[in-house]
Image (spheres, coloured by chain):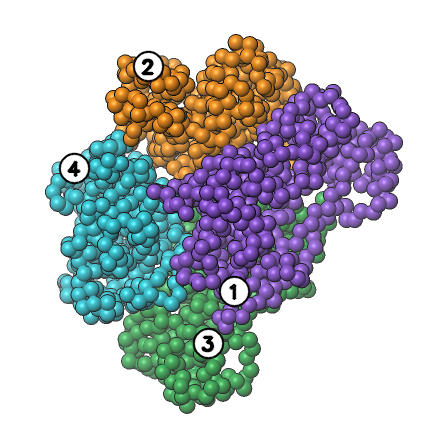
Chain colours: A green, B cyan, C purple, D orange
């Protein structure tokens, strides 16, 4: 592992400075695959709700690297022997590259095309790429090891645990960063305190008992961020439109429709035959350019949806306590009767998340637990000890929302039966 | 002027909340022309130096509006009769829309194609646009008034002065916002204090004498931001590459070259015949998509430059105390001799700025002055009163930089005469 | 009500600026009674745990005034008719003066001498004081009205509700201020959001339903601050020593002991015959001066306790799951046997707090509820609507702690029976 | 040097955490002499101008220690051989203890009684104190070494340079801390950047050339803090009253006056015969208690001054361009004629500071320079390189202020000749 002659730093609004000491890290950052992450927003369409949230996965990935570096550095300073220092570069590379395979508007495009960013991360790391070449210089099997850590099946579980766990560097960076860029203050956690409280212990990363309150605060912050930011109904509205665009374009493509704009790698995307090189060309600039062109395409469904997305004419929504299929069927029928398109003019959404999943059994679960280590060296799962974690763990929150085009519905609402129109009239 | 039933707010990391009370403002924000500003970065290529600086002119424009709103609100609360309250909506619209005509990577594209964003702002406001329609609803001559305030020739100079002056809402927002997103802390000014110190007085906005130190601090912040952020040599390097791409593409276009990617409105851009509708399609998504495609174009100059920009392979630079034409000519000759392309492989740059221009005479200048109003109601130009402003006003800073492709030069540097190679060897 | 010619401001680290517009407020701040609050720390002995927490009730009181001013200002701007604007100055005065009667190290001295700061606030407002004179200038019955609002029995309940409720300006300021000065970030709430969500409604202050998440966040912050800061066991240790000093000094005084330092109003304090003028001389400077002198008094108990407090030689503590009287009796017996003083060398502490008390019935309770107002103008208590509030409301937390002099116990611990020594050996 | 089993931390609002790794540091913090610094405010009477500035020298001293620790830690990580690591504990102790000898309201009491806090620091370190005992355990000559570093005459100049220089930990902490607690934002410097730029070089601490802008920003911040906070005329007013109280009390004491309150060590202070033990009893609690008692003393001058200080009835002031002795003499004469007391009712003040003294020659000066180290290992004084530093270095700012009791003067101003009354009438 080559040390840089002089430490390099990146000025970062969240961590103040990102410190790079190894030439491998420095060179990975300068690859075209990593630079591409500048063109993938960290929070997808959230910028349409929180205009400040224009930050990229590039910034986030540097942040995850930096937190991982600080955790390991703390382990070294504290002289913990349970941490295998030979794995340091591996952990840092995995932290830096863990999001490498994210596509444009990641969650929506994955849903629409059944893609999996983790699989793409693996392919980029193992494929014929600049990242692969640099990792291979460390050792021939190093790319596979990095991919394995990210895939959570690396032979040394503590490395996996460091990079992927309920208290990992990924979650800590995104809480802090998303709070910073949106401007909400729910995500302000005492990261220095949490880092100080982590320690390697018998093959995994645990938390010293005195850090319990800091962890509680972190879980509550995460809980609030989910409901205030990540699941914000306006953001969901834009995601729904995005998925509808992808759906409509794919339908048209499969019908051999002649688009006013169609360049590679879009056909590859629609035909599910993207190579790594194709995939790397997929970024949010390309997607937005396509939408911008399609906004004047002759297909009215496609052009309307693209206008909606580009000019932020989002769907309105109403909250409903529950949803039954009969009701939905009836709404669709009536929508059709009055000239709306039930395929596109009605969407049902039910967001859900548990701030901290406690009771999952089995092997997988052990990676998902937060364990506290007390002075007598006993390990206890945090929800056993913390009333507040136990309390919020049980909450299943989330309401159904119906999304629809506001003004189109308004034009016809008087023709709908009262039983339906009253749902949308609030 | 229609008041909204309920004030709307935008969560903003810099001002906490942006408050919208008039339906005209609300509807302007929701136009496609204003939404387009989400796809124009506030700081152009600075994100390649400061990775956090990914914020858009959309966010900035909301910020300028909000500061203007707060200034006027303070004038109203204080009961200053010198402020014409009938002009409030006009001032707010001008503040919100002042950047409407910015193109992608604004400074570079303007230099490359001799465009002028202020002229485009005017055309969009007066043209057949959604913005124009909404402004016209206020009154038939309202679009022209808004354009006139932005063009600084509106009949009521205090409105112009509020929107454009050395202490205007535009500068205050960008100092704060650029500092926030880059993460540097040079731009942290006490904006509440400055706002409290502004007052309308005899047809212009002046500063109460007790606000002198706050203004000094603001000017020093601005000075630091210019040198630390806006003129950062790495950012200049990326701007040079950007201009070279535009230059090369235009050359090729004029030679009827067949690009691997060419869609409207790019031909219109190269032929200098953009309509307002064309111009509104020009955004950074489109430019990045073009560059991404051109990175594999067969023209080696174009493809290399586009790779450089997209993958952040920027030019290296050396600082030189002075530059003389003979030396430059010789470098170019020798570059050519060893196989480099002097048209593209060498650029000279001299950034300059005065933090506060003091001694400009004439009418124009009066809009560029910061006047202090003392208790005896005397007006004095700040540099008369402030030693620190006088001191920094006189500084002409800035060094020449030579930019060049690092590894290409390295390959041939041993073939260059010592007199030239030593310049680049530092 | 006289308006000041020019608004006065105080620079405040928490609210940026405190704005004073009425001469009555300005003059109240400048009274000797209000200035005395500079010599009473906001967080008592917490500075011995969090060294930054050296802020005074003076700062806090200005903050409570400022938040109240902003709430009312928002009510006025929104044109809410349920808020009686004639009560504005009354509400502002009550907010400013609500802590006027706090004594030095308030909680401890009140426990030791059965004093009540609310009663002293009333006496100061109604007594022969500068504050009373200024309030009387507003109207003869104005002092009584201010006292009545603070005592929560004012005839117009919405004024009481504004100043004292689970979401009042007092709590909001102390959460923010205590977080700022201690440096913990648990208390960072979105106060602007909360203020925007408050509205007067049918004789009380309620929260718009859309503010529910902001209120949840506030209650969770409060919960964390209680456990991380207010009930910190080190702070409790210093409070115990403080109470012991007061207890010992009173015992000695009642025994006609001759102290090495005894000045008025201390005798009045011990004899429970303090006049308002005496009480106003009681500040933390006086108490610390007394302790500093008594640290060399000849009574060994008093001098040791004063040394402990002044030089921060606090008691150690152990956490115990539960406490039974028999066990305590036995510990005391054994302590006595080995030469310790069970009256002073053992203290039992059980802190408790509910972050938000929900189920209290009756009139009193209605002032203690947080009511959400939904779009159909229905009022609902927050715990009916919020899972998270319901969850944390049920938590009864807190462990017993035994406090004792560490090194004194260490000297004799080997003489104690195992059943007792093991409690303290952890 | 004993390492603690587990690192101890203090939560700090400015540096987030203060890290203590050596038991010597831990034990020094717990001495009675160091704990006394909790009762000495960092900014003297500035809390009467900026109410938030209630922080103590205890907090500041921890901060100076922490910055020094971080600087040395950076030197170690960077492997700089010019830093003598054997001096680490010495540097840390000197940083922690450098303010140990400060008295209550330090600047004012030193002026009034010709005391010198540096001399008292030396006496406390070398005297029969807890601090001395702990330092002696390191080695017999260690107390003398610590005192020598603080006195700037230690044999190894780089240690002195680390602790005392224009860029030392002391100045960096106070800029940041005073800005934080007052709430002004002039003092926000990029301390991480500055620390990264420091390096030991040939017996002193220098700055890497690339840190020049960060140093410029630091010097400008310092400049602003001086004028906005440290030399604020309201603070000067309170300092003048403080000095007058000390002067009056000493006069009375020397006249064998019988005070209503007089306890040790005040007589020792007036007679200039304080022992170290006496001095350690002098804190701001004692001084405020004395003033509070004297506020009802029978001497009208003393009681009025004490009321002024305790209840913040400060002197008014006017700014005058220049002062000549004749004018002052005339004012004094006329003041006397109309019944004012020229000894106490008029004070002249001229604050001054140079943000960075450049041109001082000789040995002493070399410790006062900021040297930049460029890539060719040349050292240059910063003002040679930085236009902005050169510009502000030349500014001699500051105006004369006349301080006087506002209402007393108002009562008699009509009896004064116009030539004098007009000075005070503005």
- Residue C303 visible in the snapshot: yes
Give the labeled residue for mark 2.
Answer: D333
Q: Chain of mark 3?
A: A
Quarter of the rendering containing residue B226: top left
Q: For residue B359, which numbered disc appears in the image?
A: 4
Camera-nearest residue between C347 and B348 = C347
Q: Residues within 10 Å of mark 2 (few under 14, many from 20)?
A: some
Distance from the alpha carbon under mark 4 to that under mark 3: 61 Å
Do dots 4 and 3 share one subunit?
no
Q: Nearer the viewer, residue B198 or C109?
A: C109
Residue drawn at (45%, 83%) of the image: A421
Label 1 element class? loop
Asked if one can make out residue D20 in the rendered structure from this viewpoint, the answer is: no
Q: Label 1: how many residues lie within 10 Å, few (<14), some (14-19) or many (20+)?
A: few
Closer to viewer: mark 4 or mark 2? 2
The answer to which quarter of the image holds residue C218 is bottom right
The secondary element bearing badge 3 is classed as loop
Residue found at the far left of this picture:
B362
Q: Would you say B392 lies left or right of C131 here? A: left
- Report the mark closest to the observer, 4 or 1: 1
Q: Are marks 1 and 2 in contact (CB under 8 Å)?
A: no
Identify the element where label 4 is drawn: loop
| Chain designation of label 1 | C
- Quarter of the image with the N terminus of chain D is top right
Name the residue tied to disc 1.
C202
């Amino acid at each position: 592992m080559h040390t840089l002659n002089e430490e390099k730093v990146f000025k970062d609004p969240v961590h103040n400075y990102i410190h790079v000491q190894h030439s491998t890290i420095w060179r990975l950052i300068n690859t075209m695959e990593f630079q591409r992450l500048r063109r993938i927003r960290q929070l997808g369409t959230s910028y349409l709700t929180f205009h400040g949230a224009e930050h990229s996965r590039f910034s986030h990935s540097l942040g995850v690297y930096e937190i991982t570096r600080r955790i390991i550095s703390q382990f070294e300073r504290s002289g913990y022997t349970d941490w295998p220092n030979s794995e340091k570069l591996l952990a840092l590379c995995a932290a830096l590259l863990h999001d490498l395979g994210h596509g444009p508007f990641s969650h929506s495009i994955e849903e629409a095309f059944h893609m999996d960013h983790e699989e793409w991360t693996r392919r980029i790391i193992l494929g014929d790429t600049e990242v692969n070449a640099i990792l291979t210089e460390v050792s021939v099997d190093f790319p596979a090891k990095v991919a394995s850590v990210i895939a959570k099946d690396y032979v040394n579980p503590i490395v996996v645990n460091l990079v992927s766990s309920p208290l990992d560097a990924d979650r800590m960076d995104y809480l802090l960063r998303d709070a910073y860029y949106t401007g909400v203050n729910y995500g302000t956690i005492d990261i220095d305190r949490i880092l100080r409280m982590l320690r390697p212990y018998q093959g995994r990363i645990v938390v010293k008992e005195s850090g319990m309150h800091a962890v509680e605060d972190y879980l509550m912050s995460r809980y609030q961020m989910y409901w205030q930011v990540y699941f914000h109904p306006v953001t969901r509205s834009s995601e729904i439109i995005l998925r509808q665009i992808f759906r409509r374009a794919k339908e048209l493509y499969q019908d051999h429709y002649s688009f006013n704009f169609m360049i590679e790698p879009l056909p590859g995307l629609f035909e599910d035959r993207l190579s790594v090189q194709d995939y790397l060309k997929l970024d949010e600039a390309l997607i937005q350019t396509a939408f911008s062109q399609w906004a004047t395409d002759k297909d009215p469904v496609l052009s309307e949806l693209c206008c909606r997305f580009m000019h932020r004419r989002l769907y309105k929504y109403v909250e409903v306590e529950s949803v039954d299929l009969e009701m939905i069927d009836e709404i669709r029928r009536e929508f059709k009767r009055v000239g709306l398109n039930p395929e596109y003019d009605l969407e049902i959404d039910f967001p859900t998340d548990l701030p901290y999943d406690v009771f999952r059994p089995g092997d997988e679960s052990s990676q998902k637990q937060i364990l506290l280590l007390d002075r007598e060296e006993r390990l206890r799962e945090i929800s056993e000890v913390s009333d507040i974690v136990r309390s919020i763990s049980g909450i299943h929150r989330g309401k159904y929302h119906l999304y629809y085009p506001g003004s189109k519905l308004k034009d016809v609402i008087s023709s709908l039966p009262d039983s339906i129109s009253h749902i949308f009239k609030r």
